[in-house]
Image: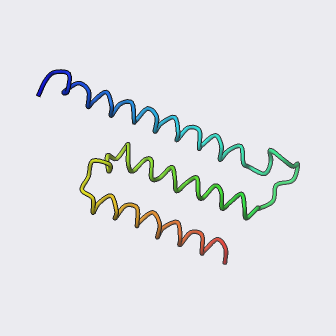
Amino acid sequence: MSDRAATAQPAATARSMTWGWIALTAITLGSWWLAPAHFTTTVAASTPITALVLVLAIVKVRLIFRYFMEVHTAPRWLRHATDAWIAVLFGAVFVVYLL
């Protein structure tokens, strides 16, 4: 393996982690901006906003799993298992919230 190939992999990993961090920061700021207090003087629970924030949380969890816990380099079964775990967990949260 050449030196160029050996240094290309860490650079690509660092770049993807940087973009992952930027996405996580943007999602966090977007979730904060969705707070009802930004639009009205009274704060009341809103089902659509709560659902949107939970969807954004799903995206954040998947990004953290993939890029910061290095699941993207794990075996396929582990990648699928973490995706299934996210789906079951957030599905349960949605069901409990809507009941």
Q: How many marks?
A: 0
**Depth check: 55 or 39 in front?**
55
- Residue at point 77%, 62% (across, down): 45
Query: In the rendering, at what x and y percent does residue 63 appear?
Result: 45, 47
Colouring convention used in this rendered image of the protein = rainbow
**Residue projecting furthest to the bottom:** 99
Query: In the rendering, at what x and y percent does residue 19 appear?
Result: 46, 34
- Residue at point 11%, 28% (across, down): 1
Residue 31 placement, left or right of 80: right
Query: In the rendering, at what x and y percent does residue 36 appear?
Result: 78, 51
85 shown above or below 41: below
**Depth check: 76 or 58 in front?**
76
- Residue at point 64%, 71% (across, down): 97
Residue 69 placement, left or right of 21: left
- Residue at point 59%, 43% (across, down): 28
**Residue projecting furthest to the right:** 41
**Residue projecting furthest to the left:** 1
Q: Quadrant of the C terminus?
A: bottom right
The quarter holding residue 29 reads: top right
55 shown above or below 60: below
